[in-house]
Amino acid sequence: MTPFSDAIRERVLVCDGAMGTMLYSRGVFINKSFDAMNLTQAPLVEAVHQEYVLAGADILETNTFGANRIKLGSFGLAEKLRDINIAGAQIARRAAGDRAYVAGAIGPLGIRIEPWGKTGVDEAREYFREQASALLEGGVDLFILETFRDLNEIGAAIDAVRSLTNLPIIAQMTTEEDGNTLDGTPPERFAPELEKRGATILGVNCAVGPGPMLETIERMEAVTALRLSAQPNAGKPRDVEGRNIYLCSPEYMASYARRFMLHNVGVVGGCCGTTPEHIRQIKAAVRGAHVPASVTKAEARGSVKVGTTIVAPPVPREQKSHLARALANGTFVLGVELLPPRGFEAEPAIQRARELKRYGVDVVNIPDGQRSGARLSALALAVLVEQQAGIETVLHYACRDRNLVGIQSDLLGAHAIGLRNVMLITGDPGRVGDYPDATAVFDVDSIGLTNLVTRLNHGADIGGQPIGAPTAFHIGVSVNPGAANLDEELRRFEYKVEAGAEFIVTRPIFDLPAFEKFLARIASAGLPVIAGVFPFESARNAEFIANEVPGVRVPEGLMERMRRADGQDAAAAEGIAIAHEIAAGLRHAVQGIQVSTQTGNIDAALGVLDGLR
């Protein structure tokens, strides 16, 4: 066969259509690993490939879209990664013969990578390199990197392939109907970036049908001279008697293939819902079209301005909030945690906030994600407290149960209604509280969340697009001095500082000498520290905190004092006394104290703060 690089210069090539939906239509359950079928049901996979070859496909994608270590690991198949990928390439090669090229298909890892997730770019690169190496061993002619939403992740995939081979790479993002990726990156940004990273052909696939995809292709054509690829879905799926059915006809898809070819598209095919009949009609359209295959936009490109990210200067820290100004000026601050109430009646909590303000407390901390029943959201309570009690809040915002785009919308809304101080936390798993069967979603962790808010503070969204005026969030992060793996805790803390953290709130402190050593280790960050303090309510409460709360160390001397307290009232008073002593000991080592209590008892909290001014 003609080398792929020569063929793409001479003519438009037709890629195959869907593999997953074809297997699904043959009764394969959607919760199975389709990639593992390369080992368990190879004849079925090969039969699908052969149908596409007979339909006229010039390129067959291997059945390896999810055959990376992360996704295979969810099925307990990580150790079969090499065998699955080699078999995928060999099956496609048998079906292709000398009539089609074999493209090693690589999809996203299924996890977030930095700056949004805890997986490093270098780690992601190694995962992709492992899969690409096996596909090369199987004998592919080129690679298709497809259905990516994150520019950093597809960049890591391109780097991985390029570290192994100079074979052609088709790099495809997946976009919304507005042409931007699912993370909001516009084609004016991702197309030049993919070209710079070393892709051979740039494209889009999945998510949308041919109509919206054509508009995206037109935008890409304006900013790159490289050939393009387009592999749309067969429209949006419809639920018909419990099955997803794609309703775009083969003729309709073929009509758009001709339109794609007018915009420097050198590879056209299909994604979800497309069948061999769709590919047959697309092939006929390609054969019948009289469009020069070597269309170039190099001359036109010189007159086109490539879209760039507009980054605005951030709001000076001392202008963000009263708390930010106090910390910037070295003023000692007092904070008390206020739990969101059960139900929607917020007035009792607002009244407690008024009492805290009268006492002289500077800020009320609103924890997020209390799992014990139906509670008012932290964001709603923070707004009500600031508006009706007149005291500033620190909104604890957890990543759990929110995806990246939803988080961005939440925070923009919070800023619009006046909230400024945020403490960004990952959040705990959901298997606590009144709903043990509740599931948890972790699209990003606190490091990724800090990166997101910092980007908003510079006037850009997660896709790098300008949002207008920058937000003015005062960014706090949590750190646990009593973490079981303190080195790991400090490593993550350094990443938070690098991501844009501006102040620190610690977990409750019980061991002053140990905390002083911890402070020495984080001093180089130069961030103000608000130390957490917690008054025990009883000896039993102290035993629970010491033995059942992860990452907390309670000295035996404090435990003994709680055990000696005679009666409930005496134990509560002793707990307040211990916490007050700890707070007084911390007074000259930190820039603030935050008191949390088991039940939201503000009288106990005020007892701890008594005299600290």
Image: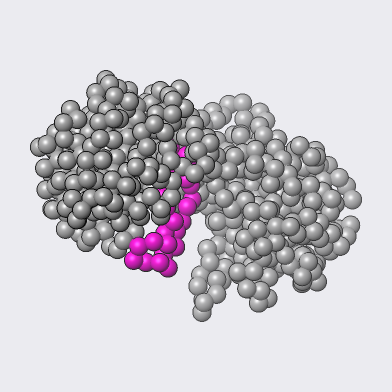
Task: Please identify the residue farthest to the top as the structure is shown.
Answer: 329
The picture places residue 174, in percent across and down from the top left corner, at 57, 50
Quarter in which the C terminus is drawn: top left
Image label count: 0
- 174 sits to left or right of 80: left
Residue at left 55%, top 75%?
Answer: 243
Q: In percent of the image, x 80 and y 63: which residue is there?
A: 53
Query: Bounds of the magenta span?
Result: 426-450
The residue sitting at 57% across, 68% down in the picture is: 246
Decide if residue 81 is on the left or right side of residue 370: right
Between residues 363 and 150, which one lies in front from this camera angle? 363
* Residue 31 in sight from this viewpoint: yes
Using the image, determine if residue 487 lies above or below residue 319: below
Asked if residue 433 is among those painted magenta in the image, a careful observer would answer yes
Which is the main secondary structure of the residues drawn in magenta?
loop
Would you identify the image quadrant in which residue 272 lies? Answer: bottom right
Q: Is residue 344 left or right of residue 219?
A: left
Quarter of image, res 21: bottom right
Residue 308 x/y as whole percent: 51, 30
**Residue at x 16%, y 53% (from the top left corner):** 569
Q: Is residue 280 above or below residue 292?
A: below
Q: Nearer the viewer, residue 581 or 328?
A: 581
- Please tell me which residue lies in front, 209 or 290: 209
Q: In the shown orientation, is residue 406 left or right of residue 162?
A: left
Residue 26: image location, x then y, percent = 68, 76
Q: Is residue 245 above or below residue 315?
A: below
Q: Residue furthest bottom?
A: 241
Q: Quadrant of residue 16?
A: bottom right
Whether residue 476 is visible here, answered yes or no, is no
Q: Nearer the viewer, residue 29 or 551?
A: 551
- Say whether residue 556 is magenta: no
Q: Position of residue 513 (x, y in %)?
A: 39, 31
